[in-house]
Amino acid sequence: MLIKWLIILSRLILQELKPDLPFSFLVIVEPMVSPKGQEQLKSLRKSLTTRASKRQELWSSRLHFKQELGAPTRHAAKWDPRVLDSFVVREILHHQNYN
């Protein structure tokens, strides 16, 4: 019983911590490959391609992009604010022909 309570307590504590864990690489899993075959992926493929086709490519400013990306209805709203800031700074390029 004591071990069960220690596990619960440790989980509660870990939920509140935001450790600064440096890492040297990132592993990305390809969502379009499945051991069950391509048929299993039809609905996922359709969802991803539909969303990608609707994705906005040009933004009036980094601030506007960050506000849209971090909106409560967006998945990125769950990101740590430091990750969102880093993404906005490093992944968004200035378009020379955009006013």
Image: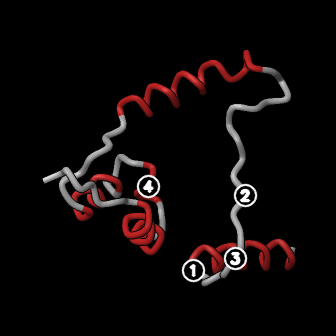
Q: Distance from label 1 to label 3 (Cα)? A: 15 Å
Q: Percent from the top left, x then y, of residue 51?
A: 43, 32
What amino acid is labelled 1 in the image?
Lys
Q: Distance from label 2 to label 3 (Cα)? A: 11 Å
Q: Label 3 crowding class (10 Å Cα cut-off): few <14, some 14-19, many 20+?
A: few
Q: Label 1 crowding class (10 Å Cα cut-off): few <14, some 14-19, many 20+?
A: few
What number is the disc on residue 76? 4
What amino acid is labelled 3 in the image?
Phe
Q: Percent from the top left, x then y, of residue 22?
A: 66, 81
Between 5 and 40, the one lying in front of the other is 40
Tell me the quarter of the picture where residue 64 sits: bottom left
Nearer the N terminus, badge 2 or badge 4?
2
Q: Distance from label 3 to label 4 (Cα)? A: 21 Å
Determine which residue is flagged by label 2: 27
Nearer the N terminus, badge 2 or badge 1?
1
| Helix, strand or loop status at disc 4 | helix
Nearer the N terminus, badge 1 or badge 4?
1
Tell me the quarter of the picture where residue 21 sits: bottom right
What number is the disc on residue 83? none
| Helix, strand or loop status at disc 2 | loop
Determine which residue is flagged by label 1: 18
Residue appearing at x 73%, y 20% in the figure: 40
Rendered view: 87 above or below 21: above
| Residue found farthest to the top | 39
Between 52 and 44, the one lying in front of the other is 52
9 left or right of 36 in image: left
| Helix, strand or loop status at disc 1 | loop
